[in-house]
Amino acid sequence: MRMEEQWWKGELAADIHQTLRMKELKLPVYKAHSPQIGMRRYFTDLLTVLSCRCNLCPTARHLAVYLLDLFMDHYDITVKQLHVISIACLLLASKFEEKEDRVPKLEQLNNLAYLCNVNMALNKKDLLKMELLLLESFNWNLCLPTPAHYIDYYLFASVGENDLHNGWPITSLTKVKAFMEKYAYYFLDFSVQDYAFLSFRPSLIAAACVCASRICMQISPSWTTQLQLLTCYSWEHLAQCIEMMLIYYENDVKEASKLKKQVTLQQQVVGSVTHQTPTQVLFQQSSYHPLAQPSAALSQFQSPVQDLCSAYRDSLQANRPNGLLSGSASSLHSYSALQASLQPSVQTLPLQAPITMQLAIATEPRHCISMSYGNSYFSGHHSYAARYFDR
């Protein structure tokens, strides 16, 4: 049964949180004994793609992955059966977390599976049998807390009025919380990709996502007394999980930097060929995409946070000396001493597009840093908002 919308803002928020914390104490122990554990990342990405295409909530997506992890940990399953089981886990999770009209239909799932190169057609009979098998395996109990169940409750108190950014007071909590949410869900998605995070309690992972986000945004102190009282976790409890998240973050930034270099080299090669044959290019039919259809290289870096960037464009026009925050995505402090800084190069992205489009993009304020999942099976690349504020 889906909980009330934005329960973390209601009067029963503390009671609901306490109930979730009690239930997570009874969660089964994950032992990582599945013979097919090497394929876990593939099916995790498959469930992520399907849930995003079906517009399912994060709790449904995380619950689906968790159900699949627990089931795989107890049985030796063939690859063909794993496809059916993964879809059945997604259906059960969506039925438990979503409203009835948002539960994916069989035809929709078959079409999406085909788009993901899954060479199989599901039928209602097989899915029902698999759902019953899963329910019996979990003793008909799907109330299994995941980090996604806690994250909004912790984000609601993630930034306080007394917090500072490099010694500067925060003048707009709304802006900071918007970026904090982007970062927290970014780390939350990381936590579901590696089964090593299953050794931590779900509530601890959610708390670590908030703390890692504060570190990346240079908000001090990194972990406040209020958050410690709210989550019941001290810095010492979160340290190991935060370290893992920051290592993933560092690798992700390196992958993004490498990708930018590859795009730059490709553009230079295209430019050299163009200069060698000026006459041919002069009379050649234009191969650029129209402005209404931006190139793939551009969409990798811009589209996921384009709406957020546009929302902040007007706010940057006023030059306020005591404004919010400033900086770049290079301000990550590592866990060991929170001193080593990540400094991904901020370069102008060369675009294979008309000059008018290049000028338009060049004048855009740089609010976002592009990042990529290095080993994703499905998604090519994802972009996430970084903290670019005006001071």
Image: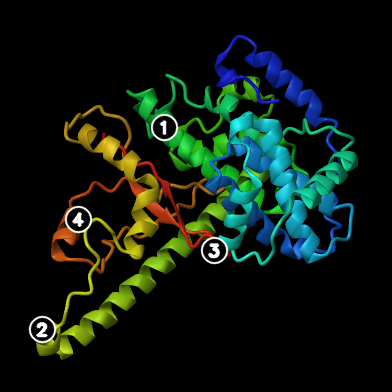
Is residue 362 shown left or right of residue 243? left
Q: Return the disc, 3 or 1, that comes first in the chain's sequence.
A: 1
Near mark 2 (Cα within 10 A), the count class, few <14, some 14-19 or many ≥20, is: few
21 or 254, which is in the foreground? 21
- The residue that disc 1 covers is 178
Q: Secondary structure at mark 4?
A: helix
Q: Secondary structure at mark 1?
A: helix
Q: CA distance from mark 2 to mark 3?
A: 40 Å
Q: Is residue 346 above or below residue 286?
A: above
Amino acid at the residue labelled 1: Ala
- The residue that disc 2 covers is 283
* Residue name at image x 85 percent, y 51 percent: 31
Amino acid at the residue labelled 3: Gly
Near mark 3 (Cα within 10 A), the count class, few <14, some 14-19 or many ≥20, is: some
Tell which tag, 1 or 2, sits nearer the viewer.
Answer: 2
- The residue that disc 3 covers is 374
Near mark 4 (Cα within 10 A), the count class, few <14, some 14-19 or many ≥20, is: few
Q: CA distance from mark 3 to mark 4?
A: 27 Å
Q: Secondary structure at mark 3?
A: loop
- The residue that disc 4 covers is 362
Q: Secondary structure at mark 2?
A: helix
28 or 81, which is in the foreground? 81
Near mark 1 (Cα within 10 A), the count class, few <14, some 14-19 or many ≥20, is: some
Q: Return the disc, 1 or 2, that comes first in the chain's sequence.
A: 1
Q: CA distance from mark 2 to mark 4?
A: 28 Å
Q: At which x and y percent is residue 335?
A: 58, 47
Amino acid at the residue labelled 4: Ala
Q: At which x and y percent is residue 319?
A: 17, 32
Is residue 383 shown left or right of residue 232? left
Point out the image quarter for the C terminus: top left
